[in-house]
Image (spheres, rainbow, N blue to C red):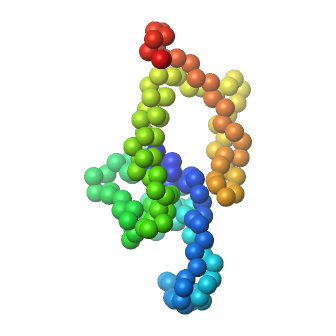
Amino acid sequence: MKETLRLHPPGPLLLPRRPSESCTVAGFAIPTETQIFVNVWAMHRDPEVWENPLEFQPERFLKESTKWDYSGNDHRYMPFGSGRRICPGISLMERMVPYAIATFVHMFKWRLPEGSNLDLSEKCGIVLKKETSLIVIPSPRFSEPELYH
């Protein structure tokens, strides 16, 4: 799930911010009240931070040494923002979504419609979404209907 959010963050640009006073960031002068957008999509593909950044490698988040601090100073991975402005639903998402996905994967076999291919092209806007909708066909893994209630 984390690798999917790294490659396809729901909000490719964080909400804009404006500094209350002039400052310098990474050698760039930022005048007061300049509107700044943080490009999470680009940060999550930075080859200086991520080895093989365009490859889908879920195992990169399984390393024991990989701890993610969303509180403010670790900006390598931030699909839901960081620090004081982080999405308040992140802890709920981290606990609930894996269970929902695991349940769907456990209970159903998934396939694409006959003759179709998986297209991962993206369409950028306020949120990042697939350019073409994903259509899949679930079929029950188990023959006992009471397991699905």
Q: Is residue 45 visible?
A: yes
Residue 108 image point, x, y percent: 51, 22
Residue 117 image point, x, y percent: 67, 34
Q: Is residue 42 visible?
A: no
Front residue of 51/61: it is 61
Residue 135 image point, x, y percent: 67, 32
Residue at 48% across, 17% down:
148
Residue at 58% across, 53% down:
10
Front residue of 96/41: it is 96
Front residue of 148/60: it is 148
Residue at 48% across, 66% down:
85
Residue at 38% across, 71% down:
73
Residue 60 image point, x, y percent: 39, 51
Relative placement, left or right, of 95 versus 143 is left
Relative placement, left or right, of 124 versus 93 is right
Q: Is residue 108 above or below residue 121?
A: above
Q: Is residue 47 above or below residue 90?
A: below
- Label count reads 0
Residue at the top extreme, as displayed: 144
